[in-house]
Structure formats: C-alpha cells, structure tokens
Image: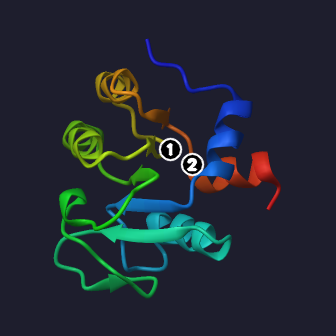
Amino acid sequence: MFNNPPDADIRDFLIAMRRIAVVGLSPKPERASYRVSRYMQQRGYGIVPVRPLVAEVLGEPAWPDLASVPGEIDLVNVFRRAEEVDAVVDAAIACGAKGVWIQLGIINEAAALRARAAGLFVVMDACLMVEHARLLGM
C-alpha cells in the first residue's frame, strides 16, 4: 500500500527542487492546473508545460510530452486521469525526473509504487500548491 512521505521529507524536497514539468497544464486560468502552476511560478519555480497542441502556457513554451522536454526535470506534476498516470510515470522514469506529484483526487497506487521503486520521490492525492503553502508558509 502506498503512503505519502512524511511532511519533513516533502518540505525538504520542495526546498531542493527548482523545475516542474506539468503534465496536463491547461492554458485556461480557471483550471486547477493553471492556478497551481502559476502559484509555483510566482514562488520562483520554473514551470514546463507538457501539453500537446498548445504553444505556450504561463509565458513558457509547451512540449508535447516529457520525452521532448530539454534539460533536467526535478518534479513531474500530474494533472491527468488516474488511468493515464501509468504512462506519465513511465515517461518520468525514462526522462530521469527526480519526483512525481500526483494531484489531489488522482489515485493510481500501482503507478506511485512503481515510481517509488525506481527511486523517484512520490506524493499522491495531494495538491502541490496547498502542501507548499502549508509546509513552507509562502
């Protein structure tokens, strides 16, 4: 059974990471993916939109998939349905990401356990923005 890491470990990871690839980042400001990503961007994190058929989001060029993203990825923030998380986790492992954050309301235990077994830092069924504000008070 998957359990999220303790708060202290999540806090340390949030402090250490700098670049977040957001799978499913919507260009629509009313969507949760946009609001969460804008919040993180405003706090100094680099945001890399991963969404096919979109040129840019939040002033950053969008990429069709994780394999296309140049450079290192610290965290893959997942805004996709639970049944799509397996493929995202496989891509995150393949591209050498350090962590995967599976957003609030999205649960795929098998994918989360596979990511953890591959050495990635994994949080599931939690909002990155809420946890950042709670643990770092920013």
Residue 127's disc is 2
Under circle 1, the secondary element is: loop
The residue shown at (65%, 37%) is 10
The residue shown at (58%, 51%) is 128
Under circle 2, the secondary element is: loop
Q: Looking at the picture, which amino acid does disc 2 mark? A: Cys
Residue 94's disc is none
Task: Report the side of 56 relative to 42 (left or right).
Answer: left
Q: How far is disc 1 from disc 2 in space, using C-alphas?
A: 5 Å
List the single residue furthest toward the right: 137
Colour pattern? rainbow
Q: Position of residue 79 (x, y in %)?
A: 37, 54
Q: Looking at the picture, which amino acid does disc 1 mark? A: Leu
Task: Report the side of 83 relative to 75 (left or right).
Answer: left
Q: Quadrant of the N terminus?
A: top left
Q: Quadrant of the C terminus?
A: bottom right
34 above or below 118? below
Q: Position of residue 29 (x, y in %)?
A: 48, 80
Q: Position of residue 91 (x, y in %)?
A: 22, 46
Residue 104's disc is 1
The residue shown at (74%, 32%) is 8
Q: Residues within 10 Å of mark 1 (few under 14, many from 20)?
A: some
Q: Is the residue under label 2 in contact with that under label 1 (CB below 8 Å)? A: yes
List the single residue furthest toward the front: 71
The residue shown at (25%, 85%) is 55
